[in-house]
Image (spheres, rainbow, N blue to C red):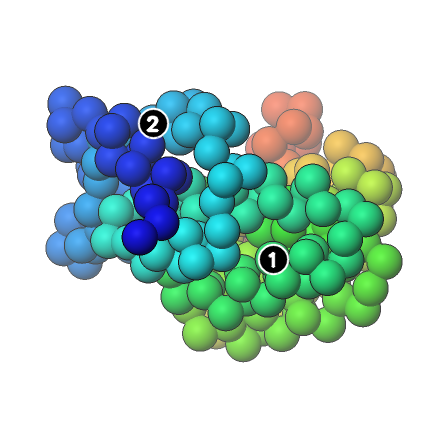
């Protein structure tokens, strides 16, 4: 029987002394967004090192076993490995499509903000640079979980990095249309991406905010204007309903 090198290396890297801290950081308590998630006590840089050593030896069958794991770090390792396979398959569009299909059919296991943020824009964002982006709008608007909705927003980071800001603003508007209150982790994601768009074109961000800032969710606004001068930040926040 073939050995799952990635899984074995992740298990070998576990550190019980870190479990409590990571469980607390990722809000695994009753009623919290990460309720019930389990940890091996492995920090992200260690997981990245394991992935760096193992990704070339990892099959989609191995990824299937890892992504379904009860352990957070195992799922993260699967996603980071998927990113590596995708990134190194630049000329193999069939393999890249396989990576994207795997990602989209396993979103139920992408169930915390770090799992989303460390994978979605490298995969979906890159894949959609030269394609129709309706998928992201659908996820943002109709995603079954806050994590699928967050994928729809955070994936636009790759577009921003290529100087394309339209989708970020359009998808942000979808979140403003959602019933209140909007989950804190969605507010933070939208605000973060707006801030990143503002780094590319500050005036455009200000123009967009000019008709929205008074009624935007407060956390979203605070994240969006984080890089503004203090006087401007205070004006926006004090004017927010």
Q: Which residue is mark 2?
A: 43
Tell me the number on the disc at residue 99. 1
Residue at horizontal 31 percent and vertical 52 percent from the top = 1
**In the displayed structure image, the side of residue 173 where residue 234 appears, left or right:** left
Which of the two discs, 2 and 1, labels the residue nearer the N terminus?
Answer: 2
Q: Against 135, is 57 above or below?
A: above
Does the CB distance between marks 2 and 1 fall below 8 Å?
no
Q: Is residue 149 visible?
A: no
Mark 2 neighbour class, 10 Å CA radius: few under 14, some 14 to 19, many 20 or more: some
How far apart marks 2 and 1 lie (CA) works out to: 25 Å
Q: Is residue 58 visible?
A: yes
- Give 193 or 176, whichever is nearer the viewer: 193
Q: Residue 27 appears in which quarter of the rendering?
A: top left
- Give 142 or 220, whichever is nearer the viewer: 142
Residue at horizontal 18 percent and vertical 54 percent from the top = 36
Q: Position of residue 65 (x, y in %)?
A: 35, 56
Element marked by disc 2? loop
Q: Residue 139 appears in which quarter of the rendering?
A: bottom right
Q: Against 119, is 175 above or below?
A: below
- Give 127 or 63, whichever is nearer the viewer: 63
Q: Position of residue 218 (x, y in %)?
A: 50, 49
Residue at horizontal 68 percent and vertical 24 percent from the top = 229
């Amino acid at each position: 029987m073939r050995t799952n090198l990635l899984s074995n290396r992740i298990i070998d890297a576990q550190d019980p002394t870190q479990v409590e801290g990571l469980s607390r950081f990722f809000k695994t308590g009753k009623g919290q967004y990460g309720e019930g998630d389990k940890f091996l006590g492995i920090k992200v840089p260690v997981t990245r090192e394991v992935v760096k050593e193992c990704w070339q030896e990892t099959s989609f069958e191995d990824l299937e076993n890892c992504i379904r794991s009860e352990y957070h770090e195992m799922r993260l390792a699967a996603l980071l490995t998927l990113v590596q396979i995708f990134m190194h398959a630049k000329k193999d569009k069939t393999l890249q499509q396989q990576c994207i299909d795997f990602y989209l059919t396993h979103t139920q296991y992408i169930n915390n903000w770090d799992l989303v943020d460390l994978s979605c824009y490298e995969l979906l964002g890159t894949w959609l640079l030269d394609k129709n982006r309706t998928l992201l709008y659908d996820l943002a608007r109709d995603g079954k979980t806050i994590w699928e909705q967050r994928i729809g927003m955070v994936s636009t980071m790759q577009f921003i990095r290529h100087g394309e800001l339209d989708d970020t603003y359009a998808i942000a508007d979808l979140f403003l249309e959602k019933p209140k209150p909007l989950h804190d982790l969605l507010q933070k994601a939208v605000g973060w991406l707006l801030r990143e768009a503002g780094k590319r074109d500050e005036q455009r961000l200000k123009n967009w905010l000019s008709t929205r800032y008074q009624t935007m969710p407060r956390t979203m606004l605070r994240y969006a204007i984080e890089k503004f001068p203090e006087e401007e930040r205070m004006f926006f926040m004090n004017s927010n309903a």
